[in-house]
């Protein structure tokens, strides 16, 4: 069977299954999620065996240790996948929730009700756990999912798909409600991105290259962020200890993720006292500093930043540092070089805190907290399927609610228009 | 100056202006809206004079009476444009509204705040009032607007643009906050649809041809509906008088609009009593009936419907009629031939009313009310800029709220991730 036909069939089946999934009770969906969780634990040995095939391929191909690490499905990873599903079971079901209801002067009662989006295509890279996370969230939100993981996780994703579909079957839910693309060939992605008659939304997760490829080739709406060039602005009225703690956490706690700080902006009034101490701590953590001329004056060990550094997403222990004359200059810098992802200010000034929150255009804007909190779980959405930095439909972390939409329902007793 | 350069400049200026408009107080925006309204009334003579140029062109080109009627800007039309703006003044400002706020276990206070989308491109057909309506709604929601009306309304839209920009100037708002594309050439649309760096959303309004053209050529997200193939299902337990009143209203009150009924579905248990009486009333109103075989048996004057009739959007005094054996058959028919726009059931059965509301996938689903209520004003949104039949971002009539999105704001006191 051609790839084209295989993917088109999957998409059509998903669309049919979506109608069934949209009407499932919360109980039934939770039962399926719990079954998947239990099967993951029961079949841990088989999963690890299949994962080993991917790991062997990866070693043969000479993939980096970091990539092999991400690809590895250990007992701990399996337990965390199962736990993730059980966390989703505990989240409230968004489907059927009334988001508002009101009465019109003519007696019509009008309401808005949450409904699923339909069929969601996820395109992601190496970690096999994404297969389970995405399937769980899509199912709980009443959607069918088509999952396309990295080709390096082919065997792992295939066994996870078997487990998911086994659990769906046992729960009496169509297997097509969660399908893994069983084709390694990358043309499968192109074919999937052309199924606009069947697939309602595409969510890519991975490097900027993958995401640009998806956005440029998709005929289906795409929710994505390209990169996270996140800033912390240390205001002149910042508490120095707090500024240091937040800056350190934002850069060092997990430098390889999208909500890590990439550029530190420091008000000139405090740069002389703040930067030497901060540079010392960054130095101990192995962070390379690339500074503006003023920064390099204050911190001699900093390298000179080039224009490219201001828009770089290092995802590494590298930090651009700029001294600014005012919050306005900081906000202009953020507007010019930021990626609308996550922006933070450290300040004790009431008015500037309010102004920064109001005027900075980013999916998450924080006062006196680390950029690392831009995460569905951390912000209280329960879980996330990704982060959107474009404004349509969702802006910021996407949880269960962002995997739904609303329709209008109208209760009348014979009203007509005059 | 080339069309390409002219449109790109407009889009860039709009993006800059959008930053200013996003931060305007409600008071300032309302002041501008009121100024536009007053200027429309003050300059009615000039508007009619410019409109006359378009009307002369239209007569020369031999446009239909209906099109000339839509194009005509009379005193009544000017008054209704001014009134429309004053209605928007009275609507609550969505920008800055907190849609939710909660506390995390670590003490972070997390909220979601409505913010404008940015720059909205409207592409529409003949009626010049759309220029005023769209400019008013976009401004109130804090967005900049680029408006591209039909080339047949060129002079009318140009004078309206002058009036809008004069009012903006006098209010101290950048004129680029609402611009009319000053180019008749249709390539202007293609250039506009490629400004994905500056324009955040495209809303096309008009015939299916225009909308398909926009959707297929846009690099920018598009919110639209292609057509409204709306159904009324008369259940076996329908009140006959109510069913007649609703069916008549849905078809006859204004047949040329997207929320008019195009197909009537009748339960076989009541078809024999309901259809003859209904056909008589439709006959008196000049409605041509195209029926399924059973309908033609019951109503001999009905023509035989072809397969195409079931998916036709007549926008005229023509109605397809089908007798169904059950509500399930009606819902299957709607799922197959409907356009996810507006679907209504007439019934006195509690369980079937609930099931129809829950299971029918359309942007507006009604029980015992006319399909003609799918309209932002009628449903209580205050006004509408269009109707979306795709699920992402908005599903159904789009009011001020749908011209915004939300960002996350986080209030901390030094929190970091561990």
Image: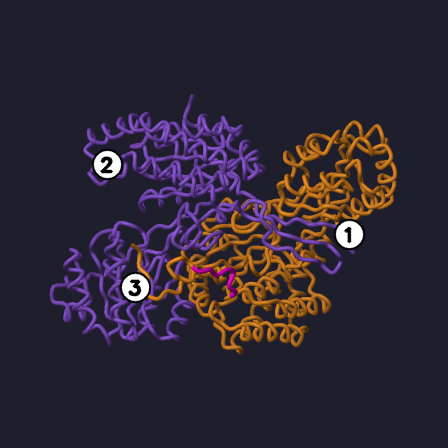
Chain colours: A purple, B orange
Residue drawn at the location 62% of the way across and 48% of the way down:
B207
Q: Position of residue A384 (x, y in %)?
A: 41, 47
Horizontal side, residue B270 vs residue A233: left or right:
right
Question: Foreground: B255 or B116?
Answer: B116
Q: Please give the name of the residue rendered at 61% of the width and 74% of the height, measured from the top-left corner.
A: B34
Name the residue carrying label 1.
A416
User: Label 3 belongs to which residue?
Assistant: A232
Q: Earlier in the sequence, mark 1 or mark 2?
A: 2
Q: Which residues are magenta?
A: B97-103
In reply to whether residue A2 is colored magenta, the answer given is: no
CA separation in Å, label 3 and label 1: 56 Å
Quick check: do tags 2 and 3 share a chain? yes
Say which residue label 2 marks: A68
Tell me where residue A161 sits by quadrant.
top left
Regarding mark 3 in the picture, which secondary structure is present there? strand
Q: Quadrant of residue B346?
A: top right
Residue B278 at what x, y percent from top left? 85, 40
Q: Mark 2, chain letter?
A: A
Q: Are marks 3 and 1 on the same chain?
A: yes
Decide: marks 2, 3 in contact (CB < 8 A)? Answer: no
Magenta part, dominant SS: strand
How far apart, in angstroms, are the residues tagged by discs 1 and 2?
A: 65 Å
Q: The C terminus of chain A lies in which quarter of the figure?
A: bottom right
Does residue B128 sit above or below B33 in this rendering?
above
Where does the N terminus of chain A fall, quadrant-wise?
top left
In the image, residue B165 sits, relative to residue B116, either above or below, namely below
Describe the element under mark 2 as helix, strand or loop: helix
Mark 3 vs mark 1, foreground winner is: 3
């Amino acid at each position: 069977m051609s790839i084209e036909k295989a993917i088109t069939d999957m998409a059509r089946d998903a669309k049919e299954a979506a109608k069934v999934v949209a009407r499932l009770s919360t109980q039934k969906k939770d039962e399926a999620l719990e079954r998947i969780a239990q099967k993951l634990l029961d079949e841990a040995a088989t999963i690890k065996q299949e994962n080993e095939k991917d790991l062997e391929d990866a070693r043969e191909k000479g993939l980096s240790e970091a990539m092999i690490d991400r690809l590895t499905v250990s007992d701990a990873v399996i337990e965390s996948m199962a736990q993730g599903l059980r966390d989703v079971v505990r989240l409230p079901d968004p489907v059927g929730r009334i988001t508002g209801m009101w009465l019109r002067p003519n007696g019509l009662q009008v309401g808005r009700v949450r409904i699923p989006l339909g069929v969601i295509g996820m395109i992601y890279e190496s970690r096999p756990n994404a297969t389970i996370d995405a399937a769980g969230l899509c199912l709980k939100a009443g959607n069918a999912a088509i999952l396309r993981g990295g080709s390096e996780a082919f065997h792992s994703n295939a066994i996870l798909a078997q487990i998911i579909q086994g659990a769906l079957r046992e729960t009496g839910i169509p297997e097509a409600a969660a399908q893994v693309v069983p084709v390694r060939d990358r043309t499968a992605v192109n074919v999937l991105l052309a199924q606009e008659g069947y697939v309602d939304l595409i969510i890519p997760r991975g490097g900027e290259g993958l995401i640009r490829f998806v956005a440029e080739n998709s005929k289906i709406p795409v929710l994505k962020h390209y990169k996270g060039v996140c800033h912390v602005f240390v205001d002149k009225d910042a508490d120095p200890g707090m500024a240091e703690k937040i800056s350190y956490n934002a850069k060092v706690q997990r430098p390889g993720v999208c909500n890590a700080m990439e550029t530190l902006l420091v008000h000139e009034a405090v740069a002389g006292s703040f930067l030497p101490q901060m540079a010392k701590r960054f130095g101990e953590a192995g962070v390379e500093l690339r500074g503006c001329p003023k920064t390099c004056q204050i911190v001699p060990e900093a390298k000179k930043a080039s224009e490219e550094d201001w828009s770089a997403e290092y995802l590494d222990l590298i930090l651009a540092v700029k001294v600014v004359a005012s919050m306005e200059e900081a906000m202009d810098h953020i507007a010019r070089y930021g990626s609308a992802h996550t922006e933070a200010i450290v300040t004790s000034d009431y008015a500037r805190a309010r102004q920064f929150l109001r005027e900075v255009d980013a999916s998450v804007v924080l006062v006196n907290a680390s950029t690392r909190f831009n995460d569905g779980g951390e912000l209280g959405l329960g879980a996330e399927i990704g982060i959107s930095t474009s404004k349509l439909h969702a802006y910021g972390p996407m949880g269960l609610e962002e995997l739904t939409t609303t329709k209008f329902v109208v209760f009348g007793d014979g009203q007509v228009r005059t």
